[in-house]
Amino acid sequence: MTTKEIPYKIYLEENEMPQAWYNLRADMINKPAPLIHPGTHQPMTLEDLAPVFCEELCKQELNNEDPFIEIPQEIRDFYKMYRPSPLVRAYCLEEKLGTPAKIYYKFEGNNTSGSHKLNSAIAQAYYAKQQGLKGVTTETGAGQWGTALSMACSYFDLDCKVFMVKVSYEQKPFRREVMRTYGADVTPSPSTTTEIGKKILADHPGTTGSLGCAISEAVEVATSTPGYRYVLGSVLNQVLLHQSIIGLETKAALDKYGIVPDMIIGCAGGGSNLGGLIAPFMGEKIKGNADYRIVAVEPQSCPSFTRGKYAYDFCDTGMVCPLAKMYTLGSGFIPAANHAGGLRYHGMSPVLSQLYDDGLMEAISVPQTEVFAAAEEFARVEGILPAPESSHAIKVALDEAKKCIETGEEKTIVFGLTGTGYFDMVAYEKFHDGVMDDYIPTDEELQKYFETLPKID
């Protein structure tokens, strides 16, 4: 088969769509460290997790044994509305760059939520409905997760309470209004509606908030309101499990045409997109059946992989959630008000943290203005306006493709285009007006938060 016989967009047939999620942890040699109880410092049990999360999700969170977990028919039926999503060969971009590299991107923005987040939102809403709950609470950064969850809750007739990071609440009013259109109650975080929110505001007057703050508020409301549970859009094992649909489809599409990637690139905030994209490829790598270069790309303003500590830390700023062993900047770290709201989390998925610590993947941090320059370069050629989060992966993919011009290497690059940026125009405006900055925390600033990490024996 010649290169030109590979279509511009590779679609899977409906009957080729995965019937089960892939649980990478089952194949990991070194399992991610368990969540531990904030009071006892003992591993969290099913009974410990049940007051916070849905029962079936608790079981998925603790499952390190089953490599595949069947996707319920109701969820598969919902997936059919927008899945399988296309794997796109960036022929126009390759030609514009003049690179011998072959560039592919898995596009997850072809649903109303505008991102990959719907893959897990519909699963978590389904399990909440199956349990007979009244509603769920959550946090959201840039708003993709909150939008996805509000859609999923509307589908299953569940109440949805969203705490949205204050800077994003103000920067992205239209995303907020989409959530409200689907029936969600949206509150800027930190807020005065919770005890934790009041404390954070007292300790940090004028703060623009963080995902860690919003998580604390959402958990407080869930655990104090009968008939509610908390759901999370990233970081947790269960979320990476649901997002494995991305990687499974990507690999199936590549296999369909005999394409073997050299590099797989994903943006990294809490880990849901990256973990989902790389799951089946990492599984092959762990088993020794293939060797891929896997790269996580994060913002220099919130560099948990590249400058964080691998240690147990609270998952939230209010210190009410379980502790996770992860690469972290400290639960008290509140990132600068950068425009990649979905990447403004102080820690990283325990699964990805373990893989990174084992040397099975690498990480790169990039400055905000270079990310938006890459987004603009991509948009002008490929015709999709990318989300700021996705544009971190685009930046590194472009860099690697340009290196191939110098070396002549015909490298095959795959990256995750997690969503669209049509609700991020304030950010694009600031970039075009030349008022966007590249804030990078100093070592002294980070050390202040490292010193507050909990002491775990």
Image (tube, rainbow, N blue to C red):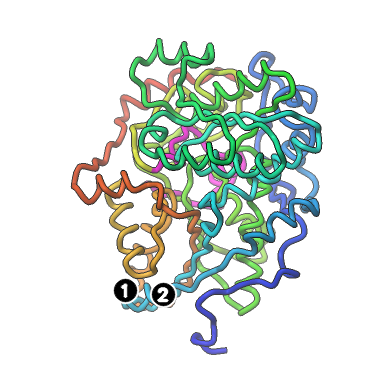
Whether 262 is among the magenta residues is no
Give the labeled residue for mark 2.
101
Task: Pick the residue in front: 238 or 190.
Answer: 190
Give the labeled residue for mark 1.
97
**Mark 2 element type:** loop
Number of the label disc, if any, that sits on residue 360: none
**Mark 1 element type:** helix
Q: Which amino acid does label 1 sit on?
A: Leu
Give the position of the N terminus as an image quadrant: bottom right
Q: Is residue 62 visible?
A: no
Q: What residue type is labelled 2?
A: Ala
Give the position of the C terminus as an image quadrant: top right
Say which residue appears at 42% left-offset and 39% top-offset: 341
For disc 2, the neighbor class at 10 Å (few under 14, some 14 to 19, many from 20) is: many
Say which residue appears at 44% left-offset and 72% top-offset: 90
**For the residues bearing labels 1 and 2, Cβ distance under 8 angstroms:** yes
**Looking at the picture, how far across and down is residue 247, in whole percent?**
62, 59
Above or below residue 292? Residue 214 is above
Above or below residue 13? Residue 117 is above
Left or right of 287? Residue 235 is: left
**Looking at the picture, how far across and down is residue 453, in whole percent?**
50, 21
Residue lying farthest left?
434
For disc 1, the neighbor class at 10 Å (few under 14, some 14 to 19, many from 20) is: some
Report which quarter residue 260 is drawn in.
bottom right
Q: Give the range drawn in magenta.
A: 340-365
**Looking at the picture, how far across and down is residue 142, in whole percent?**
45, 40
Above or below residue 183? Residue 40 is above
Mark in front: 1 vs 2: 1
Whether 362 is among the magenta residues is yes
| Alpha-carbon span between mark 1 and mark 2 | 9 Å
**Looking at the picture, how far across and down is residue 253, in whole percent?**
62, 71
